[in-house]
Image (spheres, rainbow, N blue to C red):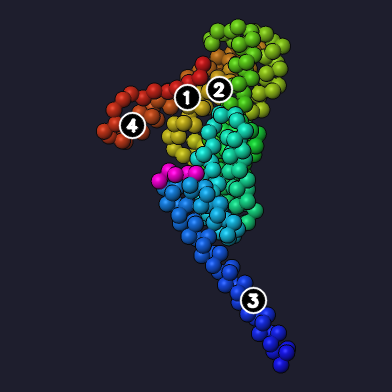
Amino acid sequence: MRHCIRVLALAAVGLVLFSGVGCDKLRARDQLNKGVASYKNARYEEAIDHFQQAVTLDPKLLNARLYLATALTNQYIPGVDTDDNNRIGQQAVDEFKKVLETNPGHDQKVTSLKGIASLYFNMKKLDMAKEYNHKVAELDANDPEAYYSIGVIDWTQTYVPRMEERAKLGLKPEEPLKDKKVCAALKDKNWANVMDGIDALGKAMQLREEYDDAMAYMNLMYREKADLECDDPGARAADLKTADEWVDKTMAAKKAKAEKQPGQEGGVTLDQPK
């Protein structure tokens, strides 16, 4: 008799615990729904609070964690180097990484990888951003945006140090790098990224016809390459000619795109760093 009573008591405890777990999952979904409503109305801080409660109640509720990461991303302000802002950015990265730890489905994995790559880029952690864009490309070799992003990162990593050296030398925009020592050092530092960027942008354009953004950066990458051809004026001139051709292709692609969208006014412009 006592044995039966003990078994019934344990069963009752188990039922209560199971009921509690079930209630937590229901409450988590309620918090998720409230968070989505707040998110859609651009009330991001309120949405973050709901999503945080949802993942606390049910850590396996993947959509809640994805929404939490996305809402945190929207709160992060690129270029603002403050402790609070950097903390928000890192929290968003950490939430996306927690999604990846759960072995999610393909779409959720791609979304998380792209989210991390974008955050790292905006946080100026360019090597990490490139690493995660490569992970996107490995997961989906037919995604042109992953290759485009790699090309943009390669250009950023080459343009900044080159312009710093040109500024030190007091060169005008059209002047070549005359200091052979500086040029050799820049070539050693930048050449691999230049060639990687040209390759990545080429792949992006193979996957997306008339990819005008990739064309614009291909123009910029060839200008980076040209400035490193210090010991070969002919190669420099050829690179600049290729860059100009990409400008023409970009303008043509933008014009064609505008013609397919009637009702839009205004000319086609191409912004280019100097």
Q: Is residue 201 visible?
A: no
Helix, strand or loop under label 2? helix
Predominant SS of the magenta segment: loop
Say which element carries label 4.
helix
Q: Is residue 8 magenta?
A: no
Q: What amino acid type is highlighted by mark number 3?
A: Gly
Q: Amino acid at mark 2?
A: Tyr
Q: Give residue 28's position: percent from left, percent from top.
A: 53, 60
Q: Position of residue 53 (x, y in %)?
A: 55, 54
Residue 185 shows in this picture? yes
* In the image, residue 200 above or below residue 245: below
Instruction: Kindly identify which residue carries mark 3.
Output: 14
Identity of the residue drawn at 59% across and 21% down: 159
**Label 3 vs label 2: CA separation?**
68 Å
Q: CB under 8 Å between callouts 1 and 2?
A: yes
- Can you identify the residue that label 1 sits on? 246
Residue beneath label 2, please?
Answer: 222
How many discs mark residues in the rendered view? 4
Where residue 156 sits: x, y (%)?
Answer: 58, 26
Range of residues picked out in magenta: 41-45
- Sequence-wise, the earlier of marks 1 and 4 is 1
Q: What is the spatial separation of the Cα atoms under label 1 and label 4, in whole angstroms?
A: 18 Å
Residue shown at the point (31%, 36%) measured from the top left:
260
Mark 3 Cα within 10 Å, few/some/many (few <14, many 20+)?
A: few
- Above or below residue 109? Residue 181 is above
First in sequence: mark 3 vs mark 1: 3
Task: Tell me the crowding category of disc 1: few under 14, some 14 to 19, or many 20 or more residues within 10 angstroms, Cα based.
Answer: many
Residue lying furthest bottom: 1
Marks 4 and 3 close (CB-CB < 8 Å)? no
Tell me how far mark 4 sits from mark 3, CA to CA. Answer: 65 Å
- Give the residue furthest to the left: 263
